[in-house]
Amino acid sequence: MTPWFEVAVVSTIFAVGNIVFGHFEEQTPKWRRVLKLVLMLGVTVGISTAFGRVWFWAFLGAMLLPVLYIHAVWLPSKGINGWTGEPRDKYYALRGWKR
């Protein structure tokens, strides 16, 4: 089996994520965003090739756990809404950005 299906899945997730949630990364350098995609594709292709498609799906599902923790627990503990990123001043300060 070739890993092209996995590449398509991860690329689609990144594309939709950038369209819908890109405003939360507005001051992140472009090179970091591209590097994140390339690394994620490399890891998922590596997992799929070495261990199979089931482990790719398990890895993808496991990647949801830190996201859920950050948005449901960690961000609210910092006084930031995990869904909207508001108040913006606190979110920007947390990211180390200037308004």
Image: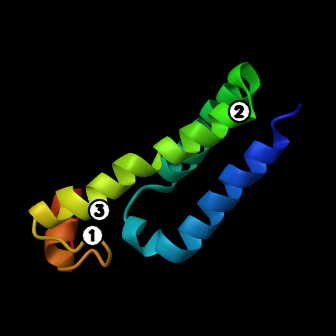
> Is the C-beta separation of discs 3 and 1 under 8 Å?
yes
- Residue 45: mark: 2
- Residue linked to disc 3: 71
In the displayed structure, does residue 56 sit left or right of residue 31? right
Gap in angstroms between the C-alphas marked 1 and 2? 30 Å
In the image, residue 91 sits, relative to residue 35, either above or below, namely below
The answer to which of 1 and 17 lies nearer the viewer is 1
Q: Which residue is mark 1?
A: 82
Which is more N-terminal, label 2 or label 1?
Answer: 2
Q: Residues within 10 Å of mark 1 (few under 14, many from 20)?
A: many
Name the image quarter holding residue 57: top right
Q: Earlier in the sequence, mark 3 or mark 2?
A: 2
Judge from the rendering whether residue 32 lies leftward or rightward of residue 81; answer left or right: right
Relative vertical location of residue 30 with respect to residue 26 in this rendering, above or below: above
Residue visible at 10% across and 61% down in the picture: 77
Q: Amino acid at mark 1?
A: Gly
Q: Is residue 84 above or below residue 3?
A: below
The secondary element bearing badge 1 is classed as: loop
Element at label 3: helix
Q: Quadrant of the N terminus?
A: top right
